[in-house]
Structures are given as C-alpha cells and as structure tokens.
Image (cartoon, grey):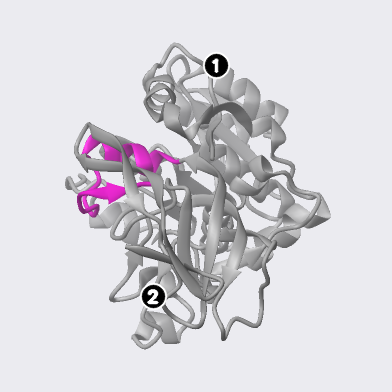
Amino acid sequence: MPCKSNSFAIFITMKAICVKAAHELEIQERPMPFITHAEEVLIKVRTAGICGSDMHVYHGTSPVATYPRVMGHEIAGEIIEVGSSVSQFGVGDRVVIDPVIHCGACYPCRTGRQNVCSQLQVRSVHVDGGFQEYVVVPQRSVYKIPDQLSWEESVMIEPFTIAEQTCWRAGLTKNDTVFIMGAGPVGLSILKRAIISGVKCIVSDIVESRLQMALAFGADAVIDAAKENVLERLVQLTDGQKPSVVIDAVCTVKSFEQTLDYVCSAGRIITLGFHDSPSAITQLSITAREIDIRGSRLHNNKFPDVIELFASGKLQVKEMITHQFPFEKIREAIALIEDPTIEKGKVILQF
C-alpha cells in the first residue's frame, strides 16, 4: 500500500504491536498509513504508555475489545505531514491523541458527553490504537503539548483526562472528604487531581509501597486494606461521618459492593470498573440515604483542562513514571507489569 508524502507515493512499512487474540501478541510489519482526508494529520509516535485497559485487551478480559487489535491510547508524537484543510497544526508540532471517537449527532454527543456516544469507538479497543510507529488521525483528535514537557511526561496527559473526568463526575467541593480505593496508576492520578480541588483525601490499598507513594503525593491518610478494618478507620478519620465521596479504582465486584458501606448519607460513589458480573447491592442501601452512584468513563472534553494543569505546573508527573522500554521489548514490559513482586508505576514504550 503506498504512503502518500509530499504529493508523491512511496512504498514503506512500519512496525505495529498487534494482539491477534488473548495472550497472542505479535510485532508486525504493516504498510505505513497515509493521509486520505484533507483534515487528517500523520503523526510519528514517540512515546506510549501501557494502561490497565491495554492489559485487559492482552489478557482477553475486556468485555468490549475486538480482535485483532493494535493496543495503545496514551500516545505522544510529532506531526510529520498535514492534510490540505488542516489549519490548527503544522509539521513539527508535538501532540497527544484523544482516543475517543464519537458521532457528534446522538443525544450524549449533543450534550457534551461524547465519551458515552451511542456509536462510541475507542482507539486501542474498537479500532487500532497507537502502539505503532505512525498513525493518521483527524485534527479534531489532536492536542498540542507544552514545549517544556518531555515526551515521557506528555504520555501522562491522557491518563489524567480520566482523573479529571472522575473528579468532575464526583462534583468535588472543598467540603468533601474523598476516599480513593486503590493506589495503582489510576487511583494515584485521581489523588493528584483531587488534591488540586482542595479536598481531604484518604487512600487504601493492600501494597505498602503504593500507600507510601500516595502519602508522598499528598494523601491526608492511607489505609492498609490487608491489615486494617477499612470501615473502622474511615469512621475514625472522618470523626464518625464517613467520606462524602468514594471512588472505586479497584474495580472488582467486591470493591463496588463495599462502596455503599464506606460512603456517608447524601454521598457520591464513582465507579470506573467494567466488570460484567452482577453485584449484591440492595435498593435500601441507596434510597434510604439518597446515595448517588455515578459511572465515569474516559473523558468528555478534558484534554484542554489537563494540558493547562500540566503547563502551569500544578500537575507534576515525573515521579509516576518508573520503567521505560523500547517498543520492540513489549513482551518484557508486559512481564514486568504482570510481576507482583516488582514495584512499578507507569510503564512507557519508546518509539
């Protein structure tokens, strides 16, 4: 397949990381993509983060992924060609890519909630993502990144759109006490964003090193769920009131059920999980205390807000990045992520 560049076509291939089926990963030689629509840009991928959802695609545990699939939705790169109608970007611009693809016409899209579009597609889940050397996307899916950010830091912008969306869905105010269940990369990102809102933050996990990281990032208190009675500690830490916001970043059936025990009356529960098994939650536990249970998926127009937080220095992320691999060593990167004996934060691929 020809690659269109500077008005002439050449034949060239690139490498892409493809999951053919669960646990079947292959680094493939593929035709390099080329611009076919006037509003598209061609991007050379520089760095990519490995997300928990990428691991679900690899393991075959994602309820929404289709195969074969190129993973990767935390992508930073450089524009090397623009379509004839592109007005917002130029060759050499450093950018990140929005993984959300929406129709723009359905009710969610018309109300600014394109993250739950009725025809939603997500790069790396429903269509190929960015674990490849080059990608072509419409200019509406691209955002410039501040010059002072490294390629590695820029990869963290997309994960923080998830945190921004979560905090927006929670409707945080300075009067809130927030309990974040889980101190993995998602939970810690939410912690960093929530602190900016001026709330009190409590974080739980079963891994001591993650709890220490949460304290280093500014958590007011941490709870070792493997050793302590979580409910008793929450009652103590909130003077008997319990948290007004509980965010489930553990995302298991059990953790979702536990949120109802941990939240105070008139509180809000934010769930991020995609588990499709039913939970044993009663109507009484919700209605009697008027509990709001809100899902939070992806983001809706949060890239500009997050990029501003990065540019202003309010969000510092270098310490969250613990391991980097050349993209050809994707198997070694996955093995590290799967090894529970290795302490790790964000794992990044270099292209």
- In x, y percent, where is residue 77? 59, 53
Q: 54 or 13: nearer the eye?
A: 13
| Quadrant occupied by the N terminus | bottom left
- In x, y percent, where is residue 274? 29, 49
- In x, y percent, where is residue 228? 47, 18
Q: Secondary structure at mark 1?
A: helix
Q: Any mark on residue 217, and which?
A: none
- Please indicate whether residue 158 sits to the left or right of residue 295 in the image: right
Q: Amino acid at mark 1?
A: Glu
Q: Which residues are magenta?
A: 51-71
Which residue position is annotated with label 2?
102
Q: Amino acid at mark 2?
A: His
Mark 2, other Cα within 10 Å: few <14 / some 14–19 / many ≥20? some
Q: Secondary structure at mark 2?
A: loop
Residue 340, above or below 299: above
Mark 1, other Cα within 10 Å: few <14 / some 14–19 / many ≥20? some
**Residue at x-position 39% and y-position 17%:** 339
Q: Any mark on residue 208, and which?
A: 1
Residue 243, above or below 172: above
Q: Quadrant of residue 151?
A: top right
Q: 153 or 64: nearer the eye?
A: 153
**Residue at x-position 60% and y-position 36%:** 202
- Please indicate whether residue 140 sits to the left or right of residue 261 in the image: right
- In x, y percent, where is residue 238? 61, 38
